[in-house]
Image: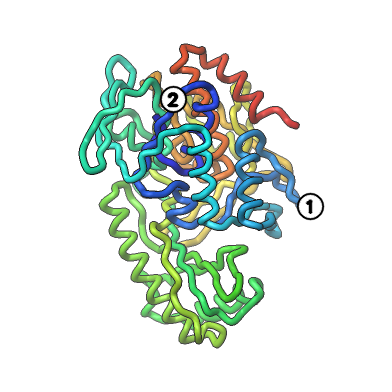
Amino acid sequence: MVVGAGAAGIAAAVAASKNGRSVVVVERRDFSGGNATAAEVGTVCGLYHNNFGEPEFLVRGFAREFAEKLQSLSGTMPLSTKDGLHYLPYHVPEFARLGREYLSENGITALFNHQVQKAVVHQSRIVTVEIRANESFNIVPSAVVDCSGNSVVARLANLPLISEPEYQSAAQVFSLKGIEEDREDRLSLLLIKAMAKAGDEISINGHLPKLYLVPGSLKNGFASFKIALPFTITEGSEWDAQIAEKAKALVSLMTAHLIKELASFKHAESDHIAASPGFRVASRTRGKYMLTGNEVKNCTHFNEGIARCSWPIEEWDANGNANLQYLPEYGYYEIPQGSLMAVTTENLFMAGRNISADKEAIASARVMGICLQTGFAAGLLAAANASGMLPSQALQIIQREQMAYL
């Protein structure tokens, strides 16, 4: 059983299915993609080496396969920053479509609009999971991979968690049409100009929200924008709903301000607002190993490494400011297998933003290119557990699939 049909969940489900297991995916929304589609992130980070030349894939196996298919469907090319980071823009509908195709082609049962309500542990194993849509029913899984983004299984089963009092700020994406500008560099400068004129009507607690153009989104007068929300993020779905309402109100104010201040926006109008803010980090399930920020910064490699990662430690504060700690050119760290294995429960595995990592480490490991890798590895670990295979045997398969260089 895989909880969540985001990047990590899709990868986990495919890996378990390709290794002989029957798989059911439980997704609370009515579409696949997780943050990639619900929050319309717009770019896949964590796929490439850090370098100041052309983009070079760091990831292998399923993660690279998924990225190349997504790039082809979206008709996009990797973009680069002056700091040597590379990322892949994508079209949101194509991400959702590709996720559904992977689930369908691999014979995976997908339960959309279903939520996990309860998880029961007996003798260090998850024995039943209660699911609810219109009515409740139980699933009896041989193994569980939690790719929910907020460790829903561990929370419901009262298993050990890694938590903080406050989390990184969220972001809200929205889209406008009718923009009279065809160059992204000029449009980005216009946004800076408009925000410099913003007054108290947009300020939150004395701080102006940060507004960014989503790279690669400007086309035929349509563009997507991201607001770094200046709200404190704490634990809990009730608080998430309040943040979502505040974000929608802020989008309305921001849209009106852009139309008023910029000539190229005088005929612009709202196209849509992403279904959910992008919540970057939440509580994680405590694993047999906890990856640390020092290990990320020191580019630590592990004998039990299952994923390669070069994205910087990227932390967003409550004022919408980003602090990035870069790895050296061509430097990368690895995620050990133990960060995907629950510390007290032998058939619970984690992937994506749920992996066992401290505050700094998850600020790097949370991006999609890494989620695809940890998802695939967790799916293989779950399939091996269900088959009675030792984790050391599963590790050999994982490393052959996505750690060996082509």
Residue 163 in view: no
Rendered view: 60 above or below 258: above
Residue displayed at 51% across by 67% down: 225
- Type of amino acid at the residue the image marks with label 1: Gly
Residue 371 coordinates in the image, percent (x, y): 53, 40
Residue 234 coordinates in the image, percent (x, y): 33, 50
Element assignment for label 1: loop
- What colour scheme was applied to this rendering of the protein? rainbow
Q: Which residue is mark 1?
A: 53
Instruction: Say which label, 2 or 1, has the lower sequence index.
Output: 2
Rendered view: 340 above or below 174: above
Judged by depth in the image, the label closer to the viewer, 2 or 1, is 2
Residue displayed at 39% across by 27% down: 144
- Using residue 174 as the reference point, say whether residue 116 is left or right of it: left
Q: Which residue is mark 2?
A: 22
Please rate how many residues cluster around mark 2, counting C-alpha atoms within 10 Å: few if below 14, some from 14 to 19, many from 20: some
Residue 286 coordinates in the image, percent (x, y): 40, 30
Quarter location, residue 299: top right
Residue 168 coordinates in the image, percent (x, y): 43, 52
Q: Residue furthest right?
A: 53
Q: CA distance from mark 2 to mark 1?
A: 43 Å
Residue 214 in view: yes
Q: Quadrant of the N terminus?
A: top left
Q: How many numbered marks have been drawn onto this rendered protein structure?
A: 2
Quarter location, residue 401: top right
Element assignment for label 2: loop
Please rate how many residues cluster around mark 1, counting C-alpha atoms within 10 Å: few if below 14, some from 14 to 19, many from 20: few
- Type of amino acid at the residue the image marks with label 2: Ser
Rendered view: 126 above or below 137: above
Q: Nearer the viewer, residue 309 or 27?
A: 27
Q: Nearer the viewer, residue 256 or 139?
A: 139
